[in-house]
């Protein structure tokens, strides 16, 4: 299990605060896996067109979700949110692979 230090735990908490709307969460639960899966698919020349479509569609879901939420994407202010979003999504799917540092 990956243990998040206090700094990364705070990034995760901010990410969760920015993603409260259930429609935004649903969009992210589709968009994030599409984006992540596009990388290994795109690692082959044959998969490159499919990967590009997956990547673009994933980001479309992400941006649509933020229209529902009414907030800008978290990564605009903190690029670490691009990684934290994957952990958040894993948690939403019940695959908690990280542990937050307890709040002081």
Image (spheres, grey):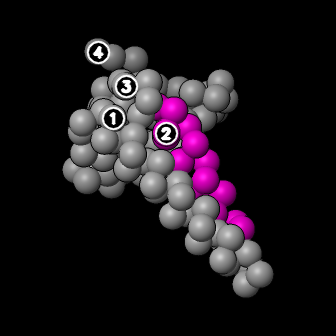
Mark 4–mark 1 Cα distance, whole angstroms, equals 33 Å
From the top left corner, tell me how far across and down residue 64 is, in percent.
39, 45
From the top left corner, tell me how far across and down residue 92 is, in percent.
57, 27
Q: Are marks 1 and 2 in contact (CB under 8 Å)?
A: yes
Disc 2 packing (10 Å; few <14; some 14–19; many ≥20): many
Viewer-proximal residue, 51 or 83? Answer: 51
Mark 4–mark 2 Cα distance, whole angstroms, equals 32 Å
Q: Name the residue under label 2.
A: 27
Viewer-proximal residue, 14 or 73? Answer: 73
Q: Is residue 63 left or right of residue 44?
A: left
From the top left corner, tell me how far across and down residue 101 is, in percent.
42, 24
Tell me where the magenta segment starts and ends, as one range.
Answer: 25-41
Q: Quadrant of the C terminus?
A: top left
Q: Name the residue under label 4.
A: 104
Q: Let me know if residue 90 appears in the view.
A: yes
Which is in the foreground here, disc 4 or disc 1? Answer: 1
- Kindly identify which numbered label has been placed on residue 68: 1
Mark 3–mark 2 Cα distance, whole angstroms, equals 10 Å
Q: In this view, does 46 lie above or below 80?
A: below
Q: Do the residues labelled 4 and 3 touch (CB within 8 Å)?
A: no
Secondary-structure class at tag 2: helix
């Amino acid at each position: 299990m990956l243990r998040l230090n206090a700094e990364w735990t705070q990034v995760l908490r901010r990410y969760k605060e920015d993603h409260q709307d259930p429609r935004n969460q649903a969009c992210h639960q589709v968009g994030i896996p599409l984006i992540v899966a596009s990388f290994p698919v795109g690692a082959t020349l044959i998969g490159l067109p499919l990967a590009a479509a997956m990547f673009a569609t994933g980001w479309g879901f992400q941006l649509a979700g933020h229209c529902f939420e009414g907030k800008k994407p978290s990564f605009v202010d903190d690029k670490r949110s691009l990684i934290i979003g994957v952990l958040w999504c894993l948690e939403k799917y019940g695959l908690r692979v990280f542990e937050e540092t307890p709040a002081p």
